[in-house]
Each structure stands twice: as structure tokens, then as C-alpha cells.
């Protein structure tokens, strides 16, 4: 069993930029510990300082107050070369070298160890091969980047970072612009790498649903309050997950696992299989349909749900929820 180890930490950082005597504070009271063997997700609205935090961790800008520690040493005391050996980064910008092959791009991850003109040793080549195998991109390793889909390209960038063989991987919105399947695949891949390779992985994301499914730890950033850290499950149960929501009209519903309006919605009596009832309620809420005097019953015909709308002695049968909602909208209009 892999024991967890804090590799990166900070206490009450102030983040921002200094120019002469002028200081622009972006965020304060930022305390955290990033552990190896864990996938950590950094979430928060735009403009709260997530990018500034990442730049500070990477040593691109100094903290305004206190310091980031890498293995208990101030990261600002380490050279850029040393930091690049220990921290690998996957940013959102596109690679311009579209004619390079996948294998060549992954090999670039070894530059911190070999230099731009250094040739790959046997050990370097083994790291490249390992990264390609770990990200399951063997089948495209000879293709140029210009022929790749967005999902494939993101895996190549992760492989390049993995070939760098740092203890920390930082990824800025790696699932942006990907379809649902690729978003899940990328995040589960990162979780597997964190656990199997004992890496500390920090992902900046807005993809709350998938982050809940895959992350071990959340860092929540919001304007004017300290960084909130904890497991997704604990933050949901104690209500702190709602710090991500911009208005009190929304809340994260603990049972459904979805963001919902706080205003109470009154449903009509609905009977039937639990999953069918849930999605009828979802459709009624979404369409703001409040039913007075109606009830709905659902039964199965050849394992297909049939929806029965009742009012007094009248009963109308529908083959799907879409038809039921269309009818109710027509009734509402009178």
C-alpha cells in the first residue's frame, strides 16, 4: 500500500503582483498541502486567482506573503531547471508543431533532463515508452499531431508530462472542449496515474460532476475567503461545496448530487418505478409546470414505461415524457 506524502505545501499565502511600490493582491489566506498518490481538483469561478495560484506554485511569480514549499524547501529557492524536473505542467494552449509525431512530442518531456540538444539515453527512451503505454496511445505514436482528435491530443500532452517524470503534475482544464466520454476517460486516467505512479496531480477544472467522481481532494477558491480544502464527499455533506455557486438561488442538492434552485417546487402525486418518477420530476421542474388536481402514474408495458395523467375521472396515456410535457404545456396555455 502506498503511503501518502505531502510534496507541496503553503500556509496563509497572499497572491498577486508587485510593480514598484504598487501591489495588487489577488487572493489571501491560501493554505494547502498537496499529497502524492492523490488527484486534487482546484475549482472556483473565473477571476478568483486560480491561475495566479498555479503560477506561484510553478515559481513564475513570487507570493506576496509567505512561501510555497516543495518537499519542505522554499520553491523560490530552486532553479527553473530543478523545478521543471519535479513539476510537469499541461496548459490549455495548442501545440504549434503539428508536423511532429506523437512519439516526438512525448520525447520532449525529457528536455529538463537532457537539454534541447541532448540525445535520449536508454533510460530516457524507457521513460518515453512508459508514458506512451501508461496513457494508452501506442496505436497513434507514429501519427503527426495534425491528425489527432482533441481527446487524443490531450492524452499526448499528459504523456509528455508523464515522460518528464516529475513528482507533481499540474493540468489547466484538461477536459475543456472534450466530449463527455473523453472527459471521463481523461479524468479517470489521471486518477489511475496518481494512484499507481504515486504522483501528486493537481487539476484546475470547472467540470464539477466529473471532479466529484474522480478527485480525492477539492481546493475551493472564492473571493474574499480562505482556500477551502477537503474531500468532495465531506464538502458536499457540510455544505461548503455551495461556495462554488454564484447566488443563493442555487444549491448543491446532497441526495441528487446536482445543482438545483433553492425555491421549493411542489410536485403532483407520482407513482411508479423510482427511476421513472425521478425523471418525470426533473422534466416538470425544468419546464416550471405546477399541476393542481392532477396525478401521474407510471406502469411498464414490455419493460417500457407508460405515463398516465389523471384528473378526476379523466385519464390520458402517453408513451414518453416528452409527449406528457407537451400536453401539459398545452393545458397550461388554456
Image: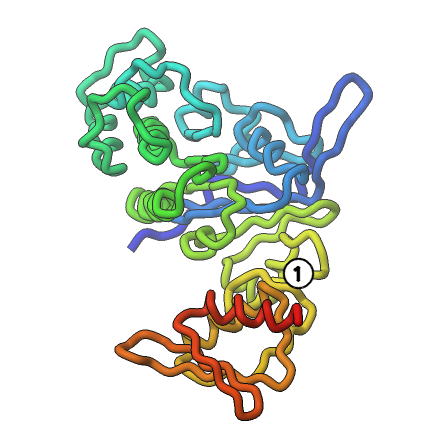
Q: Secondary structure at mark 1?
A: strand
Residue 272 appearing in the image? yes
Q: Quadrant of residue 113?
A: top left
Give above or below for 84 relative to 97. below
Colour style of the rendered protein structure? rainbow
Q: In the image shown, does 30 or 315 lie closer to the viewer?
A: 315
Q: Position of residue 292 (x, y in %)?
A: 65, 82
Q: Position of residue 284 (x, y in %)?
A: 56, 70
Q: Position of residue 328 (x, y in %)?
A: 57, 72
Quadrant of the frame with the C terminus: bottom right
Q: Position of residue 145 (x, y in %)?
A: 31, 21
According to the picture, the residue beneath numbered tag 1 turns out to be 250
In the drawing, does residue 6 fall left or right of residue 303?
right
Q: Residues within 10 Å of mark 1 (few under 14, many from 20)?
A: some
Give above or below for 154 relative to 247. above
Residue under the image location 51 percent in, 40 percent down: 204
Residue 198 appearing in the image? no
Q: Residue furthest bottom?
A: 313
Q: Quadrant of residue 26?
A: top right
Q: In the image shown, does 62 or 215 lie closer to the viewer?
A: 215
Residue under the image location 50 percent in, 63 percent down: 233
Count of numbered marks: 1
Residue under the image location 46 percent in, 35 percent down: 170
Amino acid at each position: 500500500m502506498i503511503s501518502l506524502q505531502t510534496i507541496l505545501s503553503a500556509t496563509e499565502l497572499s497572491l498577486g503582483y508587485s510593480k514598484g511600490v504598487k501591489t495588487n493582491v489577488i487572493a489571501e489566506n491560501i493554505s494547502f498541502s498537496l499529497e502524492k498518490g492523490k488527484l486534487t481538483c482546484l475549482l472556483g469561478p473565473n477571476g478568483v486567482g486560480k491561475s495566479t495560484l498555479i503560477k506561484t506554485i510553478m515559481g513564475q511569480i513570487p507570493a506576496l506573503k509567505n512561501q510555497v514549499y516543495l518537499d519542505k524547501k522554499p520553491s523560490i529557492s530552486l532553479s527553473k531547471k530543478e523545478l521543471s524536473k519535479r513539476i510537469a505542467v499541461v496548459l490549455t494552449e495548442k501545440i504549434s508543431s503539428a508536423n511532429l509525431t506523437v512519439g516526438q512530442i512525448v520525447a520532449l518531456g525529457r528536455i529538463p533532463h537532457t537539454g534541447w540538444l541532448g540525445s535520449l539515453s536508454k533510460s530516457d527512451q524507457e521513460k518515453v515508452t512508459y508514458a506512451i503505454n501508461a496513457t494508452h496511445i501506442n496505436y497513434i505514436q507514429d501519427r503527426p499531431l495534425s491528425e489527432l482528435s482533441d481527446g487524443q491530443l490531450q492524452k499526448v500532452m499528459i504523456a509528455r508530462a508523464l515522460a518528464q517524470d516529475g513528482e507533481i503534475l499540474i493540468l489547466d482544464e484538461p477536459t475543456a472542449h472534450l466530449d463527455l466520454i473523453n472527459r471521463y476517460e481523461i479524468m479517470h486516467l489521471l486518477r489511475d496515474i496518481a494512484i499507481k505512479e504515486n504522483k501528486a496531480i493537481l487539476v484546475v477544472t470547472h467540470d464539477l460532476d466529473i471532479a466529484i467522481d474522480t478527485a480525492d481532494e477539492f481546493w475551493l477558491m472564492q473571493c474574499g475567503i480562505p482556500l477551502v480544502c477537503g474531500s468532495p464527499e465531506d464538502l458536499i455533506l457540510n455544505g461548503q461545496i455551495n461556495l462554488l455557486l454564484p447566488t443563493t438561488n442555487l444549491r448543491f442538492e446532497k441526495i441528487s448530487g446536482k445543482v438545483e434552485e433553492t425555491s421549493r417546487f411542489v410536485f403532483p402525486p407520482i407513482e411508479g418505478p423510482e427511476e421513472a418518477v425521478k425523471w418525470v420530476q426533473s422534466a416538470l421542474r425544468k419546464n416550471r409546470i405546477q399541476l393542481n388536481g392532477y396525478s401521474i402514474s407510471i406502469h411498464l408495458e414490455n419493460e417500457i414505461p407508460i405515463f398516465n395523467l389523471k384528473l378526476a375521472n379523466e385519464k390520458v396515456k402517453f408513451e414518453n415524457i416528452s409527449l406528457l410535457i407537451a400536453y401539459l404545456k398545452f393545458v397550461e396555455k388554456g
